């Protein structure tokens, strides 16, 4: 199906893995494994639809509060996925980037992240950002720190700081901001995800659990986006005149 307007950048909170497993009387880990399969499917669909950037919220800075066993299994799954998927990503011309605080991960996981990014850094197809140990508050604070350091060093004047300069310090600098935000699993919040970048993003919230988020569900989200008029503060009449 061809859409009149395709989002350049889609950001997704992949929620509902645990509930999906619970409904099937399976351990939560089974839901996370099923979720990895859905990631593969969505990556393929994004490539087919010529979407330029996909950002997935895999593990928030708040997720460390989950039971230790679940966190440990999630880290193992992350490592396994990196080892198994990087060759496939490279073959499909996907550039992988991991955003978030890496120091909390084991040295082995940090090494795998570095190797995966290095292997795919020159790929020119879809850019896949995985937010792992990421928080929107952290992203903004780190950006502020970097600008403050430049002011202290005398290479920047405080009055020179503007929105564009600030955005250049964030994790997703040099990429278009998300056009479409999808959250599966029925929750209606953004959970400290890309707080700066989602300012004008179109929201699509669905009850569908992430492992069940198939092609039909994805296309429904794209159809919803395509039907919307994005005004960015302007009137409908101004937008219609511009697009005439």
Image: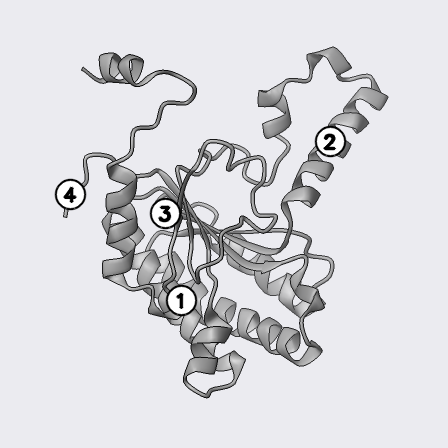
Residue sitting at 52 percent across and 80 percent down? 29
Residue at (25%, 52%) from the top-left corner?
A: 220
Residue farthest to the bottom, as pictured = 25
Q: Secondary structure at mark 2?
A: helix
Q: Which residue is mark 1?
A: 209
User: For mark 3, what is the residue?
Assistant: 126
Of marks 4 and 2, which one's residue comes earlier in the chain?
Answer: 4
Write down the quadrant of residue 236 in the picture: top left
The image shows residue 48, relative to residue 211, as above or below, that is above
Q: Nearer the viewer, mark 1 or mark 4?
A: 1
Residue 210 vs residue 167, the one in the foreground:
210
The residue to which callout 2 is attached is 144
First of labels 3, 2 by sequence position:
3
Residue 195 in the image, given as x and y percentages of width and height: 58, 40
Q: Where does label 4 land, which residue?
A: 2
Residue 50 seen anywhere in this rendered image of the structure: no
Could you say which is closer to the camera, residue 167 or residue 67?
67
Crowding around mark 4 (Cα neighbors within 10 Å: few <14, some 14 to 19, many 20+) is few
Task: Kindly identify which numbered label has been placed on residue 32.
Answer: none
**Residue 86 visible:** yes
Residue located at (23% from left, 60% from top): 216
Q: Residue at 62% across / 22% down in the picture?
A: 165
Describe the colour scheme in one phrase: one colour
């Amino acid at each position: 199906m061809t859409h009149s307007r395709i989002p350049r950048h889609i950001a997704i909170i992949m929620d509902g893995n645990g509930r999906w497993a619970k409904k099937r009387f399976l351990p939560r880990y089974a839901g996370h494994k099923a979720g990895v399969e859905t990631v593969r499917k969505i990556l393929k669909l994004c490539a087919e639809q010529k979407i330029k950037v996909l950002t997935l919220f895999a593990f928030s800075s708040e997720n460390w509060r989950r039971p230790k066993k679940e966190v440990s299994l999630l880290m193992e799954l992350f490592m396994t996925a990196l080892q198994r998927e990087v060759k496939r990503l490279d073959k499909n011309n996907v550039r992988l980037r991991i955003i978030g605080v890496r120091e909390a991960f084991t040295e082995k996981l940090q090494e795998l992240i570095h190797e995966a990014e290095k292997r795919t850094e020159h790929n020119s197809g879809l850019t896949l950002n995985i937010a792992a140990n990421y928080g929107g508050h952290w992203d903004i604070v780190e950006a502020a720190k970097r600008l403050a350091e430049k002011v202290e060093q005398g290479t920047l004047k405080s009055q020179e700081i503007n929105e564009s300069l600030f955005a250049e310090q964030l994790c997703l600098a040099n990429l278009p901001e998300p056009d479409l935000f999808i959250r599966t699993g029925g929750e209606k919040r953004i959970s400290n995800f890309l707080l700066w970048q989602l300012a004008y993003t179109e929201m699509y919230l669905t009850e569908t659990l992430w492992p069940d988020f198939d092609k039909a569900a994805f296309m429904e989200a794209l159809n919803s986006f395509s039907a919307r008029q994005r005004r960015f503060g302007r009137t409908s009449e101004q937008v219609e005149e511009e697009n005439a």
